[in-house]
């Protein structure tokens, strides 16, 4: 597999920087600068780059003074490139290199790779492979922000994105959901049909270097993507249009909006970041728009504001499906998660009817490096979900011994709208994610501490009156 070989060759260059204390995540961010120059040369878009700031200029510069030249080159690209996307990729650049020798070794290593017979879409695959490798670095903490590819693919297959739709991710990360949606659409349509009515992609990313990676990733994969640098829970989201489809895995944690004020249009304010993201998502959908969002267990069960948000969701939308995800699928994070699938209603009240729950957690292996999560693990769920992205395919309740069950809206109300429902006896008796390496054990301890702080913040948030929100 040529793609995988190239990914491995590029990744092996990372060892040059390990002695300088550079993390894998920082390395991928740096590669955004270097690979774009090389790929621009390979696929014929070098004309978008200013003279003197192209790959051959970097490659041909003597080793002495290379780092200084490279830094000037990055700054020039961020201010003088013809494409706004390229300017954004190189905006406010900072390099992790600190020695001419290391930079020269990485540039020389990239130059020696055989790039022949690689089309633009395969460049995108290669770059995604590097991002996925970055997520496996437990020490960087990047893994908890990387949604497993199999889960992304399953959410896309069930939601069935279409030509001409506005598709969003308010916590875009490296752009995985947007790229998977685009690949699905292209696989279902001809190039001519796609060109005539292309989808439009919008995302928001709060971390500068991650946004840079997202811009690079979407650009290389040929998406018409607008990626806002900012926080979707603040007024940074004002430029987003009403969406046909929102796919998201909001970051775990609390302190929504940091020191900045939450948007005034979110009905319920609280320190819990996921509750704020959930409101943003269902309020951001068009009538009939679809949402699929990954959320931790506490969002399904918390009292107070959590219950109010769930009721508002079930009033404004038809929450038709809840998927309980297995343990261990997010590297370095022990949080247990679910996917909520819903459709924005025509009316503003009483849109949710029966809710179907699929338990993919009980009696499942603990996933991790040794047991990766694969597309095949979602096959039975997708069969039960059906072909209709609004959840309206005829379904069958499998009873108390099955994984797929239906609960009426009244049964949910009788539970105080608590959606954390389980019925299978978990014979595996695995209450914790199993840590396999010293790094993973350390990450698990850190995750527990972060979870404890999040719970404290959430409790404090319960005492904040809605009227206290800053305008």
Image (cartoon, rainbow, N blue to C red):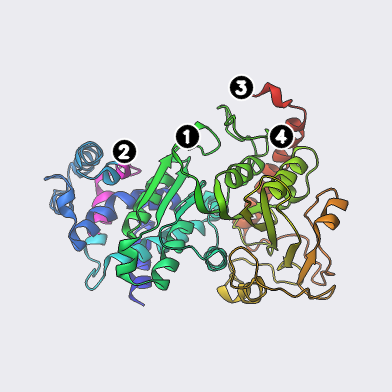
User: Label 3 near label 4: C-beta < 8 Å?
Assistant: no
Residue interval drawn in magenta: 88-109
Tell me the element at label 1. Answer: helix
Q: Identify residue for label 2.
A: 91
Label 2, residues with CA under 10 Å away: few <14, some 14-19, many ≥20: some
Q: Residue at x 14, y 48 (%)?
A: 62
90 part of magenta stretch: yes
**Residue 91 is drawn in which quadrant?**
top left
Separation of marks 3 and 2 at Cα, in angstroms: 31 Å
Which callout, 3 or 1, points at the residue further toward the start of the chain? 1
Residue placed most toward the observer, 62 or 428:
428
Tell me the element at label 3. Answer: loop
Residue 145 is at least partly visible in this image: yes
271 part of magenta stretch: no
Separation of marks 4 and 2 at Cα, in angstroms: 34 Å
Q: Is residue 311 left or right of residue 411?
A: left
Q: Identify residue for label 4.
A: 457
Q: Identify residue for label 3.
A: 470
């Amino acid at each position: 597999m040529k793609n995988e070989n190239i990914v491995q060759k590029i990744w092996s260059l990372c060892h040059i920087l390990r002695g300088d204390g550079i993390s894998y995540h920082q390395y991928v961010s740096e590669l955004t600068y270097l690979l774009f120059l090389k790929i621009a040369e390979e696929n014929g878009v070098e004309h978008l780059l200013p003279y003197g700031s192209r790959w051959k200029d970097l490659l041909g510069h003597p080793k002495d003074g290379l780092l200084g030249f490279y830094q000037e080159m990055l700054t020039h690209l961020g201010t003088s490139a013809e494409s706004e996307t390229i300017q954004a990729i190189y905006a406010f650049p900072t390099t992790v290199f600190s020695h001419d020798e290391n930079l020269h070794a990485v540039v020389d290593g990239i130059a020696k790779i055989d790039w022949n017979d690689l089309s633009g879409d395969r460049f995108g695959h290669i770059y995604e492979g590097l991002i996925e490798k970055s997520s496996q670095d437990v020490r960087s903490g990047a893994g908890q922000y990387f949604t497993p590819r199999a889960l992304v693919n399953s959410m896309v297959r069930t939601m069935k994105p279409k030509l001409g739709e506005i598709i969003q991710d308010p916590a875009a990360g490296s752009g995985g959901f947007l790229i998977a949606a685009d690949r699905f659409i292209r696989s279902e349509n001809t190039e001519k049909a796609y060109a005539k009515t292309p989808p439009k992609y919008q995302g928001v990313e709060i971390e500068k270097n991650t946004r840079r990676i997202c811009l690079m990733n979407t650009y290389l994969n040929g998406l018409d993507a607008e990626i806002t640098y900012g926080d979707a829970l603040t007024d940074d989201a004002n430029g987003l249009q009403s969406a046909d489809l929102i796919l998201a895995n909001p970051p775990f944690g609390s302190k929504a909006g940091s020191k900045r004020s939450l948007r005034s249009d979110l009905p319920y304010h609280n320190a819990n970041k996921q509750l704020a993201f959930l409101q943003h998502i269902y309020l951001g959908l068009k009538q009939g728009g679809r949402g699929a969002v990954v959320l931790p267990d506490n969002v399904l069960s918390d009292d107070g504001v959590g219950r109010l948000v769930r009721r508002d969701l079930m009033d404004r939308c038809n929450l038709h499906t809840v998927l309980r995800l297995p343990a261990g699928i997010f590297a370095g994070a022990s949080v247990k998660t679910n996917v909520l699938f819903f459709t924005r209603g025509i009316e503003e009240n009483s849109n949710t009817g029966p809710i179907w729950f699929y338990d993919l957690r009980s009696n499942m292996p603990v996933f991790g490096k040794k047991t990766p999560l694969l597309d095949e693990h979602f096959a039975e769920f997708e069969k039960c979900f059906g072909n209709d992205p609004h959840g309206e395919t005829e379904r069958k309740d499998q009873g108390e011994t099955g994984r797929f069950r239906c609960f009426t809206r009244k049964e949910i109300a009788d539970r105080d709208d608590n959606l954390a429902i389980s019925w299978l006896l978990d014979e595996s008796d695995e209450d914790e994610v199993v840590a396999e390496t010293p790094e993973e054990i350390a990450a698990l301890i850190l995750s527990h501490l972060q979870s404890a702080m999040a719970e404290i913040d959430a409790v404090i948030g319960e005492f904040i009156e809605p009227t206290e929100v800053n305008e």
